[in-house]
Amino acid sequence: MLIHKMGGHDESLTKPGGETMAQTLREAAEAAMKVASGLFETQGSVSPIWLIDTPEGNTIVHGEFTGDASKDAIADAIRQKFGATATRIIFISEAWMREMKGPFDGIRPSEHPDRYEVIHLVAEDASGGQLSIRRIIDRSSGTAKLLPSEVHEYQLTEGRLASFFQRANVKH
């Protein structure tokens, strides 16, 4: 896990006259997906990355997954280090997804015959806001092409790489 402390806050969004305008969770998530999409288009992949805002500044955490144990270890380390102080956490990675039709059948998305590949983003803030954005990666033509973004807002997003505030038992 590689941590880059940025210090200060991103002030790229400003009102006329230079006054800083705070980004909503959705604006921050859409901006992050735009960056991730650009990385995918130039590099052909997106490594797991967390964009973490705290009162002290912004932090970028890079991690590489080698299996379930590394996913759990990195997610737990981020919850422990930032769970009590973060105001916003955005996680971005390539992933396998599938549509559920009925109860879970025990087949992981990565092993399901109807899976599809996506750039997946989960954004959460300390006030309880949660949303995800996914861009399907279409490789049917032999060349990877990103389909338009799909935004989903949630009351509660679950999973080892989501619910950073809830799983850290943080009350804000």
Image (cartoon, grey):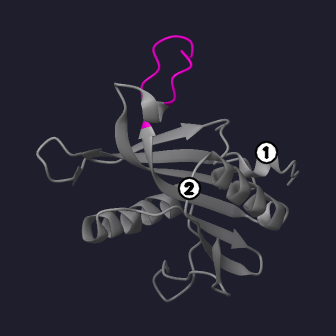
Q: How would you classify the magenta stretch by its main secondary structure? A: loop
Residue that carries the numbered disc 1 in the rendered image: 166
Q: Is residue 78 left or right of residue 162?
A: right
At 29% across and 63% down in the image, what residue appears? 44
- Where is residue 41 drawn, in percent x and y? 26, 65
At 56% across and 19% down in the image, what residue appears? 106
Q: Secondary structure at mark 1?
A: helix
Above-or-below relation of 60 to 65 = below
At 64% across and 38% down in the image, what residue appears? 157
Q: Residues within 10 Å of mark 2 (few under 14, many from 20)?
A: few
Amino acid type, label 1 = Gln
Q: Secondary structure at mark 2?
A: loop
Q: Quadrant of residue 42?
A: bottom left
Q: Is residue 61 left or right of residue 40?
A: right
Amino acid type, label 2 = Thr
Tell which of 156 and 115 is nearer to you.
115
The answer to whether the residues at label 1 and label 2 have Cβ atoms under 8 Å apart is no
Residue that carries the numbered disc 2 in the rendered image: 66
Per the rendered image, the range of residues in magenta is 97-108
Above-or-below relation of 171 to 7 = above
Tell which of 136 and 86 is nearer to you.
136
At 65% across and 55% down in the image, what residue appears? 70
Residue 129 drawn in magenta: no
Q: Residues within 10 Å of mark 1 (few under 14, many from 20)?
A: some
Q: Is residue 44 left or right of residue 125?
A: left
Above-or-below relation of 51 to 164 = below
